[in-house]
Image (cartoon, rainbow, N blue to C red):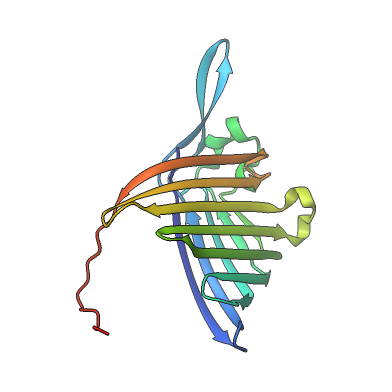
Amino acid sequence: KTQDRLYLDTKYGRAISSQWSLFASLNVLSQFANGYQYVEDGGVERAELVSGALAPTFITAAYGFEYRPNTWFHIRLSPFAPRVTLVSRADRFRPALGDTPYGVRPGRSARWEVLAAQVLAEVDKDIATNVNLKARYLLFANYETLALRTIDHRLDLALTAKVNRYLNVALTGIALYDRDQDEKIQYSQGLTLGLLYTLQNFEDEKK
């Protein structure tokens, strides 16, 4: 799969200065289609199921401070960010991922990580005429198993160029490190051509 991502993020914040605010957020990350890894078996490539519809689903509640020095960058620092990982019918993923797929133990369908921290940084900036850069970095650390190799990292990048009024071209990339999924860094990249049409029900004021 190249793009299969369901993501919902909601946040409530209260300013404590011109650049800092207190916040509470809830986000849900999942997918809608089966995912496979392919292995060689006697010279024949065999598909092994590693994910399914809404399996896994990550639900994270984060509390902390947000720093927003300008309009195109912000970072959320969450020293308390409990997360639950939901994996329905986890047994179907064990042939490929081992006894604890996504950290879920045998006989269970959820993994709770109550004592955890999260850092989220986002960039959304026009770096040239008609060229926009979006970047999103997410770090998640469980205090109970805290070590450099157990910290989860995810980086999403998108460079979009507007060709004309209706067309744009985007170069995207994703890098993911999560030992509960794979001991190696997972990554993907893509090049897309998009159609853009804006609906507007108001008129711009003439200056």
Report which quarter residue 181 is drawn in. Answer: top right
Q: Quadrant of the N terminus?
A: top left
In the picture, measured across the screen, residue 46 lies left or right of residue 99, that is left
Which residue lies at the image location 50% right of the left edge and 59% below the top edge? 134
Which residue lies at the image location 62% right of the left edge and 89% below the top edge? 17
Q: Position of residue 197 (x, y in %)?
A: 24, 59
Residue occupying the far top of the picture: 42
Q: Nearer the viewer, residue 175 or 200?
A: 200
Q: Nearer the viewer, residue 184 or 111?
A: 184
The relative height of residue 93 versus residue 103 in the rendered view (above or below) is above
The relative height of residue 75 versus residue 59 in the rendered view (above or below) is below
* Figure disc tally: 0
Q: Nearer the viewer, residue 28 or 64?
A: 64
Report which quarter residue 204 is drawn in. Answer: bottom left
In the picture, measured across the screen, residue 117 lies left or right of residue 24, that is right
The answer to whether residue 107 is seen in the rendering is: no
In the picture, measured across the screen, residue 204 lies left or right of residue 9, that is left
The answer to whether residue 42 is seen in the rendering is: yes
Which residue lies at the image location 57% right of the left edge and 54% below the top edge? 85
Residue occupying the far right of the picture: 147
Q: Position of residue 29 (x, y in %)?
A: 50, 56
Which residue lies at the image location 69% right of the left edge and 65% below the top edge? 117
Q: Quadrant of the C terminus?
A: bottom left
Report which quarter residue 131 is drawn in. Answer: bottom left
Q: Nearer the viewer, residue 101 or 37?
A: 37
